[in-house]
């Protein structure tokens, strides 16, 4: 299937999705939202895919929601249409999902990167929530996910001033997992994704689920949830295979069962 706003490439067990609206710095319009939702649903159901990398162009991961599409909407339009709620499906993708960010990741672009499991950034990356400069505010998780990632002081600074932070500041603040030279960005993300995709998919998905739970509940409940998932992995063939391979000093052959 081909898409108007996305490019898709499959490399063994990894899918690479490239946002492809270069004329608008990959601004996120309703077509991107619909197509990304469809594509992720397809990849979710595809047993051959173990991890996904999402990237943009060298100049922009995504410069935010499409301002030209939004500008004429009024309150009743956005409220009754539950504007942007379709992005929840993207945040709910349950296979490993890495953002490879170069250039601008602003507003909805920063929020989309934060929906991924972790962000690998090029040294050229710039993150920000500039909605305040447009008379609005973050609407797709910026006030919530950014605050959890970088803490109140920096989240307030970014959301209230609308300033951008570079990749080094984003890494030291905890928003970004790794910063690499621009020419290494895609290889670094694809190698990380390939490594993750080589592990047992049930254990990978449960790990993602458990880490995400840390943002939703108390430590006691989170620890209980983690322990139950850990117990359940002993029902998989891959647990037997992974541990036998260690003892027999060989590489495991996971079957994702
Ligand atoms: N929406 C629509 N078009 C855009 C956007 C955008 N967010 N960003 C850039 N473009 C377009 C420009 O209009 C321009 O088009 P044209 O050539 O037709 O005039 C083209 O992309 C190139 O942009 P610039 O000429 O401005 O490029 P510069 O290198 O001079 O500047 C910037 C780059 C600094 C990134 C600048 O384009 C900019 O400030 N963009 C807007 C950033 C912004 O405010 N983002 C937040 C948007 S609001 C938002 O995201 C709400 C989130 C909640 C909902 C989430 C739903 C997805």
Image (cartoon, grey):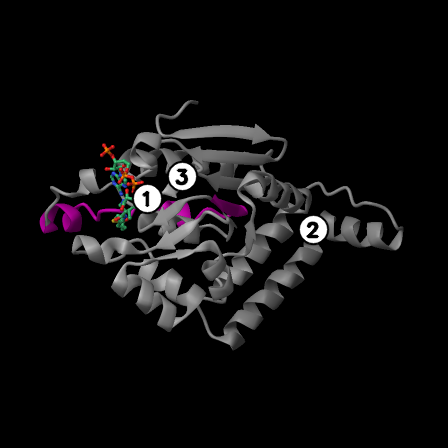
Given the current orientation, which residue lies at the most extreme bottom position? 220
Of residue 17 and residue 91, the one placed in the foreground of this image is: 17
**In this rendering, which labeled residue sits more in front, label 1 or label 3?**
3
Residue found 49% across the figure and 58% down from its top? 168
Find out if the beta carbon at label 3 lies less than 8 Å from the nearest ligand 1 atom: yes
Residue found 58% across the figure and 66% down from its top? 226
Find out if the beta carbon at label 2 lies less than 8 Å from the nearest ligand 1 atom: no
Q: Which residue is mark 3?
A: 59
User: Residue 63 shows which numbered tag?
Assistant: 1
Given the current orientation, which residue lies at the most extreme right position? 248
**In this rendering, which labeled residue sits more in front, label 1 or label 2?**
1
Is tag 2's residue or tag 3's residue first in the polypeptide sequence?
3
- Residue 27, given in percent of the width and then of the height, sits at 30, 39
- Residue 54, given in percent of the width and then of the height, sits at 47, 40
Q: Is label 3 in a helix, a strand or a loop?
A: loop
Q: Is label 2 in a helix, a strand or a loop?
A: loop
Of residue 145 and residue 34, the one placed in the foreground of this image is: 145
Task: Quadrant for the N terminus, please.
Answer: top left
**In this rendering, which labeled residue sits more in front, label 2 or label 3?**
3
Instruction: Confirm whether the magenta stretch covers residue 79.
Output: yes
Instruction: Confirm whether the magenta stretch covers residue 46.
Output: no
Local crowd size for mark 3, using a 10 Å CA cut-off: few (<14), some (14–19), many (≥20): some
Total tally of numbered discs in the picture: 3
Whether residue 175 is visible here, answered yes or no, is no
Q: Which residue is mark 2?
A: 236
Residue segment shown in magenta: 75-101
Whether residue 198 is visible here, answered yes or no, is yes
């Amino acid at each position: 299937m081909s898409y108007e706003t996305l490019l898709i490439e499959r490399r063994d067990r990894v899918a690479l999705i490239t946002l492809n609206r270069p004329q608008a710095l990959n601004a996120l319009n309703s077509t991107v939202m619909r197509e990304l939702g469809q594509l992720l649903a397809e990849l979710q159901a595809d047993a051959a895919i173990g991890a996904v990398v999402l990237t943009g162009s060298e100049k922009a991961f995504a410069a935010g929601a499409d301002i030209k599409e939004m500008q004429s909407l009024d309150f009743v339009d956005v409220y009754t249409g539950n504007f942007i709620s379709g992005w929840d499906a993207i945040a709910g993708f349950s296979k490993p999902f890495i953002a490879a960010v170069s250039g601008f990741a602003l507003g909805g672009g920063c929020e989309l990167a934060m929906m991924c499991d972790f962000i690998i950034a090029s040294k050229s990356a710039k993150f920000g929530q500039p909605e305040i400069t447009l008379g609005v505010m973050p609407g797709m998780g910026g006030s919530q996910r950014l605050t959890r990632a970088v803490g109140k002081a920096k989240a307030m600074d970014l959301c209230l001033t609308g300033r951008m932070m570079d990749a080094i500041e984003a890494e030291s603040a905890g928003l970004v997992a790794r910063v690499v030279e621009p020419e290494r960005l895609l290889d670094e993300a694809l190698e990380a994704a390939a490594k993750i995709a080589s592990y047992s998919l049930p254990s990978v998905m449960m790990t993602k689920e458990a880490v995400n739970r840390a943002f939703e509940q108390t430590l006691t409940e989170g620890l209980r949830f983690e322990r139950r998932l850990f117990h359940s992995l002993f029902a998989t063939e891959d647990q037997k295979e992974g541990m036998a391979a260690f003892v027999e000093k060989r590489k495991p052959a996971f079957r994702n069962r």
